[in-house]
Image (spheres, rainbow, N blue to C red):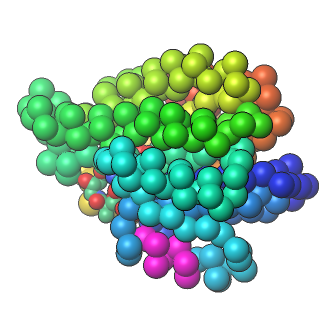
């Protein structure tokens, strides 16, 4: 690409494999010249990522472990990142989790623990991450998270995750206000369905895909590369006037009744 992100250190959280939305984002950022730092929860994902980086000739990336369920882990991860690169210019938050049992049937049956777990990993984590990342973002920059239409509308089976994403989107706005004076922008991309490891095995995913082809203005699915380019835009100086925003990358599906 055009070196839009030359000299920028960007932390990417949430690559599980080559299908991950975060991997699409990593490729876009790499092609734009960014220096990438990755965080993973599971060792298995770290191994997959190492292989992907080799296959794609991406070298010298720092790989740090981070479980967003744990404040100490987040703190330690960003301290380690700070020791290696000093300043960071952006963070990609691409993590979410809910118990599979809570992702079908009636939302009304969500347990207290299931509700709290989804909120903890999928929404609160952005708050905790932003707090730690801010310390290293001394030159300003951008933070981008990933959300889904189920935050705005009732989408069958999305259930507890829809409520967590609604909280995530509201958190984007409150965080944007807090860190704006430091020149840090906080935005979200609302992606259409992408077949990833998370989406695997959750009921109703295939139905969601076919409706897009039928009803979305562009009559086709999106892929993680399209999410990658939109996220790159939001992290770059091109989006310097944009914060607290939710940008839909969904072939226009959200505008259709
Ligand atoms: P993936 O399964 O590829 O990625 C999910 C990631 O979440 C994994 O890398 C996983 O880490 C990470 N994660 C879960 N729990 C934790 C934790 N406690 N600490 C740190 N990391 C954790 O799925 P996607 O790429 O689909 O998901 C990425 C984001 O995109 C999510 O926020 C999702 O809600 C959102 N999204 C996805 C859409 C889709 O259709 N796929 C549509 C719209 C939004 P690990 O690999 O180490 O387990
Ligand atoms: C309406 C849609 C159909 C699917 C419904 C719910 C999807 C929820 C997403 C959520 C992140 C999935 C999970 O938490 C899965 C988890 O219980 C089990 N999976 C794992 O543990 C794997 C191994 C790891 C890597 O996954 C995680 N997350 O850590 C929504 C569709 C159309 C769009 C999607 C998939 C949106 C989204 O938010 O992902």
Q: Which residues are magenta?
A: 45-51
- Percent x, y of residue 37: 62, 61
Residue at 32%, 48% (x, y): give it: 70
Side (left or right) of 10 relative to 166: right
Residue 115, image quadrant: top left
When the figure is inspected, residue 116 is found, relative to residue 61, above or below; the finding is above
- Percent x, y of residue 56: 69, 78
Residue 49 drawn in magenta: yes
Magenta span main SS: helix
Side (left or right) of 235 relative to 95: right
Side (left or right) of 243 relative to 119: right
Residue 223, image quadrant: bottom right
53 and 205: which is toward the camera: 53
Residue furthest right as drawn: 2
When the figure is inspected, residue 39 is found, relative to residue 88, above or below; the finding is below
The reply to whether residue 228 is visible in this rendering is yes
Residue at 70%, 25% (x, y): give it: 182
Residue 221 drawn in magenta: no
Residue at 67%, 29% (x, y): give it: 185
Quarter of the rendering occupied by the N terminus = bottom right
When the figure is inspected, residue 59 is found, relative to residue 25, above or below; the finding is below
């Amino acid at each position: 690409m055009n070196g839009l992100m030359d000299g920028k250190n960007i932390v990417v959280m949430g690559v599980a494999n080559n299908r991950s939305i975060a991997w699409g984002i990593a490729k876009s950022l790499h092609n734009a010249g960014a220096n990438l730092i990755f965080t993973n929860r599971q060792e298995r994902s770290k191994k997959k990522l190492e292989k992907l980086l080799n296959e794609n000739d991406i070298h010298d990336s720092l790989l740090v472990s981070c479980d967003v369920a744990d404040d100490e882990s987040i703190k330690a991860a960003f301290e380690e990142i700070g020791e290696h690169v000093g300043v960071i210019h952006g963070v990609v938050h691409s993590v979410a989790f809910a118990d599979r049992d809570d992702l079908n049937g009636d939302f009304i049956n969500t347990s207290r623990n299931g509700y709290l777990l989804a909120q903890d990993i999928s929404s609160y984590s952005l708050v905790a991450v932003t707090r730690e990342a801010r310390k290293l973002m001394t030159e300003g920059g951008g933070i981008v998270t990933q959300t889904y239409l189920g935050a705005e509308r009732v989408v069958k089976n999305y259930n507890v995750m829809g409520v967590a994403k609604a909280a995530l989107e509201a958190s984007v706005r409150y965080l944007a206000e807090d860190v704006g004076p430091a020149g840090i922008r906080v935005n979200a991309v609302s992606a259409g369905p992408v077949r990833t490891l998370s989406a695997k095995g959750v009921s109703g995913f295939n139905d969601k895909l076919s409706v897009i082809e039928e009803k979305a203005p562009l009559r086709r699915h999106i892929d993680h590369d399209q999410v990658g380019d939109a996220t790159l835009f939001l992290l770059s100086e091109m989006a310097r006037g944009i914060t607290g925003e939710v940008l839909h990358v969904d072939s226009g599906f959200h505008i259709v009744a």
